[in-house]
Amino acid sequence: MKRPIQLQQQNLEEVGSRMPVPNYNREANKTGIVHIGVGGFHRAHQAYYLHQLRQLGEASDWGICGIGLREADAKLHDIFNKQDHLYTLMVKHPDGKIEPEVIGSIVNFKMGVTDSEPVIACMANADTRIVSLTITEGGYNFNPTTGEFNFDNPDIQHELRYPNEPITVYGFLTAALKRRRDNGLPAFTILSCDNIEHNGDMARKMLLAFAEVQDKGLAEWIAQEVCFPNSMVDRITPVTTKADIETLAQNYGVQDAWPVTCEPFIQWVVEDKFSNGRPAFEKVGVQFVPDVGPYEKMKLRLLNAGHSVLGLLGALHGHPTINACLEDQTFKTYLRAYLDQEATPILGNIEGIDLEDYKYSLLERFANPNIKDSVSRICSESSAKLPKFLIATIHDNLATGGSIKFATLIIAAWCYYSDKGKDRQGHPIEIIDAMSTELHQAAKQTTTDPLAFIRQESLFGNLIKNERFTKLYTEAVHKIYKDTNIKKYMKDMI
């Protein structure tokens, strides 16, 4: 067994005898990108792309400064400080092979929770030319039914009263952009890397809505000067486990307190609209296109919705991971039926994409036994995900007369999941959702009002008024509440 060595800049030469490490001078990096929301996905995706570019001797002006705006980010902040912002990316292949590599593209990390000034100053610095986001669907602060900005958020109300005391991403962005404008500096690009259709357009709409109330003149400047390219991102990145940390220490001799694991597949499609330059990401496989829309829709309605299909049904049945779901032929057949009969018909043709090949690759990726993506992670924050991933497909198929039976069962399963919080064996299910209380309150009324759960207009829009949907949904709910053997109903449908 190799002696575990602490992952730090001073130890890179020794670490490099055990796995690939950065070949570039990290100290010479300028901070060209400020990234808000440094989770596992950012480190497996955008930061990895930049690392690849730096390995080619490019992009020395584009180092990343991570930003944490939540108390929960303090743990990563402390680990990054100890590890000189280095981390290990562990690519897990279906055959069990693991490829670890030390990533060096993140060069700083700042917390905005207790002191906002260092974060604002970093974003307002002339070297910063892109501010990118992975803040999850819920971080955009919009009503999922109306698509309008939520001004009732107490943090937003605070920022409108005290613009120099930002809390949310919108408060920080406006504070930094105001300082740049006042100092005669060009605007930075705001680059969303979240799973929302037209994510750049949504970021623009939400920021302008906030800015127009806070400072109308600034809003006009933002509208004219700031670019918000839409992008589509893709790489399955499970939550890091204790076993991952131990594997790295025992098999590779490197002590990393928070490595990141991911699948081999990676994709990034971006609209080439930037305010103040960008790295040459095309040299490492990023695809720049005039319109990301069709690619976004494909990914959200197939991959993300497919994950939710497996996650919610798997949670009720008792499958712990997504790959376990795919090892169950009933789940595999059900997912493929949903993808073929309900998701694919509303996508149309997508240039350069063979949808049959794409769906086949999805099933392979989901089945990767070395990833073991937990159903609890996939089900987390379903209230922010399902309106965009799955419920939108129901609306589309209702409008065109298409099939809705597979997606409707998912909504019924979500209701039971939110109500009981147990699988069919009676084991408790961990529910992680900002709306968990509201979901539970609505779902628990189902026994007396079968449509209670879908009366939540902010999630379901006017589905309650659609007789075709309510009939199927009521039947599904009655079946699940009578007998939680979810596989029986899945088999009946396929």
Image (cartoon, rainbow, N blue to C red):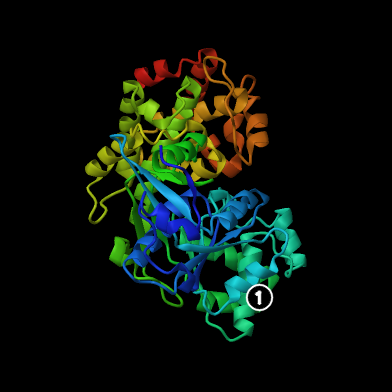
Percent position of residue 316, x then y: 50, 23
Q: Quadrant of the C terminus?
A: top left
Is 80 rendered above or below residue 116? above
Percent position of residue 57, x then y: 33, 70
Q: Nearer the viewer, residue 484 or 114?
A: 114
Q: Nearer the viewer, residue 2 or 327?
A: 2
Looking at the image, which residue sits at the far bottom? 184
Can residue 140 be seen in this snapshot?
Answer: no
Secondary structure of residue under mark 1:
helix
Residue 93 occupies which quadrant of the picture? top left
Q: Nearer the viewer, residue 470 or 94?
A: 94
Can residue 94 be seen in this snapshot?
Answer: yes
Badge 1 amino acid? Lys
Q: Residue at x 46, y 31 (%)?
A: 311
Percent position of residue 445, x then y: 65, 25
Percent position of residue 102, x then y: 41, 54
Q: Which residue is mark 1?
A: 216
Is 422 rendered above or below residue 42? above
Q: Quadrant of the N terminus?
A: top left
The total of numbered circles placed on residues is 1
Is 206 rendered above or below residue 245? below
Q: Nearer the viewer, residue 446 or 433?
A: 433
Q: Residue at x 36, y 25 (%)?
A: 331
Is 362 rendered above or below residue 201? above
Q: Tag 1: Cα neighbours inside 10 Å, few (<14), some, or many (≥20)?
A: some
